[in-house]
Image (cartoon, grey):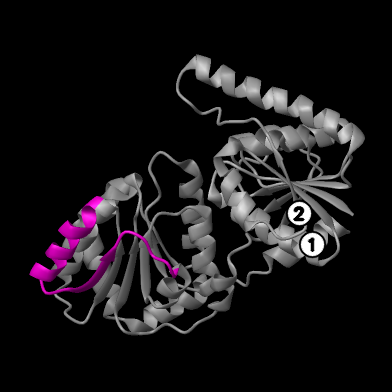
Amino acid sequence: MKVWIATGGTGGHVFPAMAVATELVSRGARVTISCDGRVKNMVRTSRPAGTRMAHVWASGVGAKGRLKQLWALFKIGVSGVALTLRFMIFRPDRVVAFGGYASVPAVFAAHVWGIPTFLHEQNAAIGRANKFTMRWVKTLMTSFPTVSGIPSNTSARVIYTGLPVRREILAMAGAELPNESRLLVTGGSLGATILDDVVPGAVVAMKNKKIFVTHQTRPENVARLQKFYADNKIRANVLSFINDMAGAIAGADLVIGRSGASTVIELQTIGRPAILVPLNINPDQAANAASFAHTGGGFAIEQSRFTQKWLTSTLVDLFDNPSRLQKMAQKARVENNAVTLISDAIMK
């Protein structure tokens, strides 16, 4: 079977695609992976042996300015025509798209030639690009049991598969809570500045000298936060990058962070309670956090309500009640068989 996998835009789209590509190759499929220039090197270094690569000319339509938006649409249109011509000669048996603007050309070309098409939606609210391509898709695969924004008139079959995660995350699935008052804060981007502003002060106000904090932040904030924790006699490891994120999550009793799809699914796979603060300009993150909180595994708190006073009270309540953290961890845990379920659906 010949399978065309379309991905691109960000690493969040690329990794699940590579995980599925690896599984499909192991089942004997001949896989071609298309992507845009932004992630070309990432795909080249992470794709499984035996796969082919193809480039699509595409960029995000969300750019400010009418001319930039028109230019982005033009590039996607040109790539759609180019892939339509390519599929006329080298026609795949299946097209699998992992969302974002870079997958639109392949989905369109597959529609022209009547090729069965599978689309994966990472978030609990369907993205603009996926919503646009739904008209041409036979099967929509979702990371969360419920996804808002799916067009009511779609004829696509919707199946809940989950989101593929890294092998290191799967290896930690179901790990016991350390029960050592360990807090993990993940906030290494510009949008996570509020975590640096709120969390350290809240931890100090807890007056809990047993707590140990692992705090990921932007490089320019490392020295400042190290000094703050040290001055207040809080045990902390402040760093700009976490090499072993699977180990960091598994080694925490509680996680504080944003709510991108990959982050939420990794927490669910390992089974860790969390306080999630969605990026206030991203409705996808709000939906992801709400889905996680609905299980009872943690809190989804709007950025405007994420204050030092609220966080201090919440942290004291949780760390003073280890049994509650244990129950939240159990509720957060979700079995992850995404790679198998997605590959089974494609190969049928």
Query: Relative to the observer, which residue lies in front, 141 or 311?
Result: 141
Confirm whether the magenta stretch covers residue 238: yes
At 14% across and 75% down in the image, what residue appears?
207
Could you say where residue 69 lies in the image, as x and y percent from the top left?
54, 21
Residue type at mark 1 is: Val
Screen quadrant of the N terminus? bottom right
Q: Which residue is drawn at 29% across and 52% down?
A: 218
149 horizontally vs 252: left or right: right
Percent across and percent down for residue 44 are 63, 51
The residues bearing labels 1 and 2 have C-alpha atoms spaced at a distance of 8 Å
Q: Is residue 163 above or below residue 151?
A: below
Q: Residues within 10 Å of mark 2 (few under 14, many from 20)?
A: some
How busy is the neighbourhood of tag 1: few (under 14 within 10 Å), some, or many (20 plus)? some
| Disc 1 to disc 2: CB gap under 8 Å | yes
Asked if residue 325 is positioned above or below residue 313 in the image, the reply reads below
Rendered location of residue 216, percent (x, y): 32, 61
Residue designated by label 2: 51
